[in-house]
Image (tube, rainbow, N blue to C red):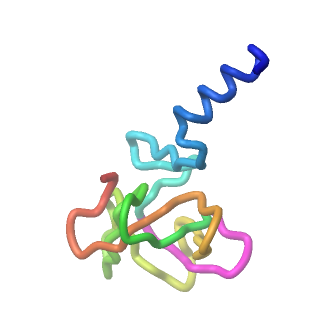
């Protein structure tokens, strides 16, 4: 095995080999605040989102008003803060829908 390949293999094994969402401490991903008014779209989303039941990147609570805290999303049909598209594979973000305690797990 070439010595040039060893650092690459180490980096892959440390990262788990998959794409992990790197949510910042201020609850942003790709410069997008992960709270606020969210519109679900079929194309041209700001983020591709996969709903999972375990090991989410973010726990999301649907709220009717004042989505001011990390993981609180108010679903709207116009004037969103950001747009998402639900996908089954290759998401930018994996979420778990919760009734309480939203945010970064």
Q: Nearer the viewer, residue 93 or 44?
A: 93
Q: Nearer the viewer, residue 11 or 62?
A: 11
Return the x and y of residue 66 as percentages of the image width and height: 31, 70
Q: Residue furthest left?
A: 100
Rendered residue at 30%/53% (across/down): 105
Return the x and y of residue 90 as percentages of the image width and height: 64, 62
Q: Residue furthest front?
A: 1
- Residue 37 drawn above or below residue 21: below
Q: Nearer the viewer, residue 8 or 73?
A: 8
Give the magenta range: 36-46
Return the x and y of residue 81 as percentages of the image width and height: 53, 66
- Residue 3 drawn above or below residue 53: above
Return the x and y of residue 10 as percentages of the image width and height: 60, 26
Direction from residue 103 to residue 15 in the image, left or right: right
Direction from residue 56 to residue 102 in the image, left or right: left
Rendered residue at 61%/66% (across/down): 48
Residue 46, by quadrant, is bottom right
Residue 4, by quadrant, is top right
Let me know if residue 56 is in the magenta part.
no
The N terminus - image quarter: top right
Let me know if residue 45 is in the magenta part.
yes
Rendered residue at 69%/26% (across/down): 8
């Amino acid at each position: 095995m070439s010595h040039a390949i060893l650092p690459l293999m180490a980096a892959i094994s440390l990262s788990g080999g998959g794409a992990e969402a790197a949510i910042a401490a201020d609850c942003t991903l790709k410069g997008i605040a992960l709270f606020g008014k969210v519109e679900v779209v079929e194309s041209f989303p700001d983020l591709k989102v996969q709903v999972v039941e375990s090991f989410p990147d973010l726990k999301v609570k649907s709220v009717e008003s004042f989505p001011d805290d990390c993981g609180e999303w108010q679903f709207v049909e116009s004037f969103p803060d950001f747009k998402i598209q639900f996908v089954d594979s290759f998401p930018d973000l994996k979420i778990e829908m919760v009734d309480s305690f939203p945010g970064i797990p």
